[in-house]
Amino acid sequence: MAEGRAAAGRPGEHQFTVFVETTTSDAAAAVDAWAGTGVHRIALQPTADEPDPEGVVRFAAELGNA
């Protein structure tokens, strides 16, 4: 990525964001799977059948304050 950006005249670090569809039951595992991979942001999206979408939002808020 860095070589391509430099060749295009766009030096510097590229920021990565991943969108992870998840449920409250395995949200921590989803975040752990991406942690340390070089992504800069992880956006959690509750699945369509998630029984507690507010719980996913609460989890994300708590994670952001950790």
Image (tube, rainbow, N blue to C red):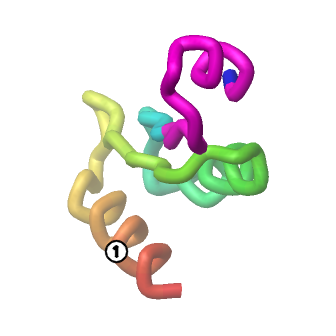
For this orientation, the residue located farthest to the left is 54
Direction from residue 36 to residue 15 in the image, left or right: left
In the rendered image of this protein, does residue 26 appear above or below residue 62? above
Q: Name the residue type under label 1.
A: Ala
Q: Foreground: 33 or 49?
A: 33
In the rendered image of this protein, does residue 54 appear above or below residue 58? above
Q: Residue shown at 69%/28% (left/top)?
A: 2
Q: Foreground: 15 or 21?
A: 15
Direction from residue 48 to residue 37 in the image, left or right: right
Q: How many marks?
A: 1
Q: Residue shown at 28%/47% (left/top)?
A: 51
- Residue neighbourhood size for the residue with mark 1, other residues' Cα within 10 Å, grouped as few (<14), some (14–19), many (≥20): few
Q: Residue shown at 70%/55% (left/top)?
A: 35
Residue under label 1, please give it. Answer: 61
Name the spot of residue 13 as percent of width and height, x first: 59, 43
Q: Foreground: 5 or 23?
A: 5
At mark 1, the secondary structure is helix
For this orientation, the residue located farthest to the bottom is 66
Name the spot of residue 63 as percent of width and height, x first: 48, 75
Q: Residue shown at 25%/52% (left/top)?
A: 53
Direction from residue 21 to residue 6 in the image, left or right: right
Magenta stretch, main secondary structure, is loop
Task: Report the magenta residues as a range.
Answer: 2-16
Name the spot of residue 11 as percent of width and height, x first: 57, 34
Does the segment drawn in magenta span residue 50?
no
In which quadrant is the N terminus drawn?
Answer: top right
